[in-house]
């Protein structure tokens, strides 16, 4: 097996004798590890896994991209690992944005600095949606959230998570007072918690809701998408909150601080091509999680803007009871 | 539904379908038998390999693994008193005494039949409730989870036998350990000492592997000899069919175990260890002769085994209803589904009914197939009990640490297994029941989270636990569990007083003589309680509340334990009050263990660990096994090399070659 692989590498090396190709073949010489700071199964795990396979086709020397889950503390363990890794491009990570930015914005001491990460590419963006339980007659449309006569109980994974922070922004920008109900393991779990009646409403990426809307367990109240992918559900823009359009989660690939420009461009290019690969596209279609790619330059500019937005709403992200 | 069932049958009963089923069953059995490896590891390692398979093939393979792994784990539990997987821990209590009496065949036969039957009953219940699965899952919210966890924890009181006090202490310490890490309710990080690895909490599989496997290996290597102590020349694996028949004779035990297993399996985050233990405890208490348990009562094997396999059917209920995994295996299995383009959730059963039934069918077929396969090789496996422990010990230590590493690719897990191995050995020697610590480790987080979430739901009204029907019923059961044995103990004490019989003295601690030495361990526990109390004060109220409460309770019981160990008059009174006549599983033979041998046994494990850290598994393992066999076992060079080659060969072939998994290479070569 390794004999065949060595032969293959030798063959590739012989074929790429041109100077330009030689200069580029310097990276990568070995397999690349992509850290997934979350447990297997969710969107943050499956999205990078879906492109890890095809990426190999588009990387010089056909090296493999190997996903490695380092779950814990809402992603902090994985991010810290990325921060520590050598800036040689052989360790990259998937980043939940704004999840990774929130702790430092709220004054928590963290062992990584998001401003120092090198942004390689964006894989996808999931806009949020606010929903209530299908059987909850008291809350059928967005305005009902204001008519409860008490703060809305929202189910979340926990303080510092993106949904928790979004609820803070929703309160300050849309005037929906809410109290958090935290401690759920995943969006799947807190949506079911809301359906069960633990809380009144919840906020999560649109994709997480499709199956629950289809089964009738959940009513979608408002979507943060530019154009609603669920028929009949109003967008934030149509309700007059255009500033909040696009509020959601970005799945971003980052490299350790100090990763050379040439290296991040090679990886970025491979990711862009892998996303267009039929295998990745077929997967995205099947699970209804479309890619929304940005290359390294686009994502860097985009994140500068996004970080400014969250800095503006810094006080909304704080812990509340 | 009928159509999907037929479709599933058609898919399974093809050459390829049966091939994957058989492969899954064999992998499950092997991973079950070897301590440290388990179903979760097998599925996690196989995920990348399922890329190239058809979805139904991948699902058949996984179903095969899930159905067979628990019987594999029980074989080890019966033969060498070490559960191959944690849920088989309760099987040790009566399975191992049977093996020591030369009745391993009886025990394994009963375990196999109970596993098959339990697994099938679990699936039958699953199929019966599938139409209602959603409603059932929605009945259980945070208050119910809290009460269930408390019920499980209170069952500790049922089965700690003569060491009630130390059972409680081990349980409370287990709770404190379960609180380590990131608390998702309050968003605070606790008791990590700044160690980043601990943010995700103490990983369960490594901790349980340490507590059960590593500790038992240290204990064995101190004792020496072979597992079978009664000096029989050959272990006759006979009476297997008697064991099978016993499962039907005691059909009530089988049925109760299966129902408990299915029910507990359906509760996310509880799992097989608790299910098996609850089944064991309730069987013991329903029995006319509880004192016969822990000494080789066949019912003590049937009860946990039926529950253990039935839990897989139960775990599928929340998995299919909402995509919430009911067990650790299911959590990883969901990842397999996603990779194959099926999204877990309420639509799974509607959109992919054929796949769901393929899984159910594979799971049930594998339960039966595993028993048939397992019983076929039982005779060969039983020879293990005749092997000199000096060959067994290094092989099991190496394999379990390798398995622990393979689960998450993290060397920190190996260190946890090592630390818990030492702790487990101390607990064996000083008679703190390990099972209660395990139950607490598993349930601690569920209890705390359930409590805080209930409080948030009800805006702080404690009545939320009693105004909801199911929660109230669970509370009533819990109260019964706690009051019944306490009343029994008090009654017994009063009666013995009335008869003028002197209260029994506290069990002497065998390893150390003299009053001073006897006080060392209780004093250490007391110090731990004080330290934990102090530590909780660094945190904000919600992060602190439950750990602080636990630590204060531990302090009270640690004081009582210390007093009991003094052997003074009040001490004897406390000891007698907390020493019931209920059966005491997990006994120690009480023979003194010279400290020189203990230190040597620990030094060998430590040496292996250091070698792994430095030069990786592939270099450290053969050297460790060979040296151990030759020097400790005083066996020939040839035998040493043979043992080393066999162990390393298995590791290399299974992990590096078949699973394409790269084991830790060591600091020097990493």
Image (spheres, coloured by chain):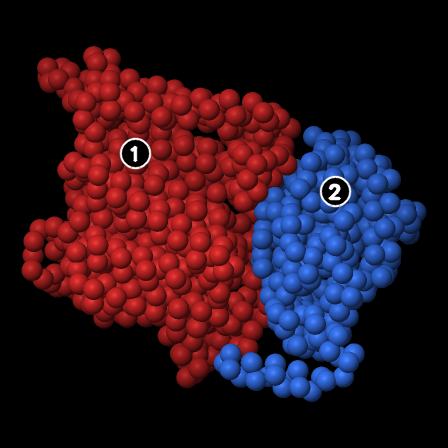
Chain colours: A blue, B red
The image shows residue A116, relative to residue B237, as above or below, that is: above
Q: Which residue bears the numbered disc 1?
A: B432
Q: Residue furthest top?
A: B569
- B212 with respect to A275 (left or right): left
Q: Position of residue B610 (x, y in %)?
A: 40, 50
Q: Are marks 2 and 1 in contact (CB under 8 Å)?
A: no
Q: Nearer the viewer, residue A8 or A202?
A: A8
* Residue at the image position 17 percent from the left and 56 percent from the top: B634
Can you see residue B480? no
Q: Nearer the viewer, residue B510 or B484?
A: B510
Give me the chain letter of mark 1.
Answer: B
* Residue at the image position 75 percent from the left and 75 percent from the top: A23
Q: Position of residue A316 (x, y in %)?
A: 80, 36
Give me the chain letter of mark 2.
Answer: A
Q: Which residue bears the numbered disc 2?
A: A102
Q: Position of residue A295 (x, y in %)?
A: 81, 65
Label 2 crowd (10 A; few <14 / some 14-19 / many >=20): many
* Residue at the image position 34 percent from the left and 57 percent from the top: B398
Q: How many marks?
A: 2
Q: Marks 2 and 1, how far apart in space? A: 44 Å
The image shows residue B447, relative to residue B492, as above or below, that is: below
> In which quadrant of the rendered view does residue A294 lie?
bottom right
Q: Are marks 2 and 1 on the same chain?
A: no
**Quadrant where the image shows the C terminus of chain A:** top right
> In which quadrant of the rendered view does residue B74 lie?
bottom left
Mark linked to residue B385: none
């Amino acid at each position: 097996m390794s004999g065949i692989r060595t032969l293959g590498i030798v063959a590739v090396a012989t074929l790429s004798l041109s100077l330009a190709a030689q200069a580029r073949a310097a990276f990568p010489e070995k397999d690349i590890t992509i850290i997934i700071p979350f447990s297997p199964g969710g969107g943050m795990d499956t999205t990078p896994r879906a492109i890890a396979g095809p990426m190999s086709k588009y990387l010089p020397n056909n090296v493999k991209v190997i996903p490695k889950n380092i779950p814990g503390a809402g992603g902090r363990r994985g991010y810290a690992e990325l921060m520590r890794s050598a800036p040689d491009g052989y360790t990259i990570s998937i980043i939940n944005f704004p999840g990774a930015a929130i702790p430092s914005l709220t004054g928590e001491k963290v062992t990584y600095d998001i401003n120092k990460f090198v942004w390689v590419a964006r894989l996808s963006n999931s806009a949020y949606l606010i929903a209530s339980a299908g059987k909850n007659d008291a809350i059928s449309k967005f305005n009902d959230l204001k008519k409860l006569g008490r703060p809305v109980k929202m189910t979340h994974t926990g303080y510092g998570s993106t949904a928790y922070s979004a609820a803070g922004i929703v309160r300050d920008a849309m005037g929906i007072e809410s109290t958090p109900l935290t401690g759920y393991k995943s969006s799947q779990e807190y949506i079911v918690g809301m359906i069960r009646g633990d809380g009144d409403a919840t906020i999560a990426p649109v994709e997480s809701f499709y199956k629950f809307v289809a089964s009738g367990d959940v009513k979608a109240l408002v979507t943060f998408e530019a154009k609603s992918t669920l028929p009949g559900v109003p967008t934030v823009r149509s309700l007059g909150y255009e500033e909040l359009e696009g509020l959601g989660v970005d799945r971003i690939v980052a490299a350790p601080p100090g990763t050379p420009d040439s290296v991040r461009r090679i990886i970025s290019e491979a990711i862009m091509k892998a996303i267009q690969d039929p295998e990745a596209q077929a997967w995205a279609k099947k699970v209804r999680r479309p890619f929304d790619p940005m290359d390294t330059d686009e994502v860097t500019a985009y994140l500068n803007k996004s970080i400014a937005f969250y800095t503006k709403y810094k006080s909304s992200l704080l812990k509340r009871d | 539904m009928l159509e999907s069932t037929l479709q599933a049958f058609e898919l399974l009963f093809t050459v390829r379908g049966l091939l994957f089923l058989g492969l899954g069953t064999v992998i499950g059995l092997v991973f079950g038998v070897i301590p440290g490896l388990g179903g979760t590891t097998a599925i996690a390692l196989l995920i990348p390999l399922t890329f190239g398979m058809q979805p139904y093939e991948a699902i058949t393979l996984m179903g095969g693994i899930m159905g067979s792994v628990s019987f594999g784990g029980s074989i080890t539990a019966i033969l060498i008193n070490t559960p191959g997987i944690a849920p088989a821990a309760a099987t040790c209590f009566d399975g191992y005494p049977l093996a020591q009496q030369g009745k391993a065949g009886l025990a394994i036969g009963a375990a196999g039949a109970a596993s098959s039957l339990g697994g099938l009953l679990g699936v039958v219940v699953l199929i019966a409730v599938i139409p209602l699965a959603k409603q059932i899952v929605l009945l259980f919210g945070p208050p119910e989870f809290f009460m269930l966890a408390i019920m499980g924890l209170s069952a500790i009181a049922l089965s700690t036998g003569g060491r009630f006090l130390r059972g409680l202490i081990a349980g409370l310490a287990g709770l404190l350990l379960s609180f380590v890490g990131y608390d998702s309710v309050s968003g605070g990080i606790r008791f990590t000492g700044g160690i980043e690895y601990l943010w995700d909490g103490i990983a369960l599989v490594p901790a349980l592997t340490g507590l059960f496997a590593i500790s038992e290996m240290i204990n064995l290597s101190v004792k020496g000899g072979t597992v079978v102590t009664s000096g029989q020349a050959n272990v006759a694996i006979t009476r297997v069919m008697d064991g099978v028949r016993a499962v039907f004779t005691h059909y009530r035990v089988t049925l109760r175990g299966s129902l408990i297993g299915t029910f507990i399996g359906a509760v996310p985050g509880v799992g097989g260890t608790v299910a098996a233990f609850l089944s064991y405890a309730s069987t013991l208490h329903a029995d006319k002769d509880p004192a016969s348990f822990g000494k080789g009562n066949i019912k003590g094997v049937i009860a946990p085994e039926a529950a253990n396999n039935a839990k897989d059917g139960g775990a599928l209920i929340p998995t299919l209803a909402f995509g919430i995994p009911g067990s650790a295996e299911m959590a990883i299995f969901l990842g397999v589904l996603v990779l194959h383009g099926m999204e877990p959730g309420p639509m799974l059963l509607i959109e992919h009914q054929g796949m769901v039934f393929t899984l159910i069918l594979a799971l049930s077929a594998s339960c039966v197939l595993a028993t048939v396969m397992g019983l076929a090789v039982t005779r060969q496996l039983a020879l293990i009990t005749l092997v000199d422990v000096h060959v067994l010990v290094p092989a099991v230590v190496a394999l379990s640490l390798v398995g622990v590493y393979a689960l998450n690719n993290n060397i920190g897990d190996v260190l946890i297994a090592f630390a818990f191995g030492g702790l487990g050995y101390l607990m064996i020697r000083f008679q703190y029941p390990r099972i209660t610590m395990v139950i607490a480790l598993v349930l601690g987080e569920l209890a705390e989270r359930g409590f805080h979430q209930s409080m948030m739901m009800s805006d702080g009204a404690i009545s939320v636990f009693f105004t909801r029907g199911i929660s109230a019923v669970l509370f009533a059961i819990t109260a019964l569990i706690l009051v019944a044995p306490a009343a029994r103990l008090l009654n017994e004490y009063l009666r013995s007083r009335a008869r003028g019989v002197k209260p029994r003295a506290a069990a002497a601690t065998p390893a150390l003589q003299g009053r001073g030495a006897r006080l060392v361990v209780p004093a250490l526990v007391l110090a731990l309680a004080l330290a934990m109390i102090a530590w909780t004060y660094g945190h904000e109220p919600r992060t602190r509340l439950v750990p602080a409460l636990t630590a204060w309770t531990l302090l009270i019981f640690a004081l009582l334990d210390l007093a009991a160990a003094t052997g003074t008059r009040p001490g004897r009174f406390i000891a007698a009050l907390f020493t019931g006549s209920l059966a005491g599983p997990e006994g120690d033979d009480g023979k003194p263990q010279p400290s020189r041998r203990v230190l040597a046994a620990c030094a060998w494990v430590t040496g292996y660990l250091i070698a792994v850290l430095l030069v990786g598994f592939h270099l450290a393992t053969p050297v460790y096994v060979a040296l151990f066999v030759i020097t400790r076992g005083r066996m020939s060079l040839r035998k040493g090399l043979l043992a080393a080659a066999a162990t390393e060969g298995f590791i290399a072939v299974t992990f590096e070659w078949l699973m394409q998994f790269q084991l830790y290479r060591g600091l020097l070569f990493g």
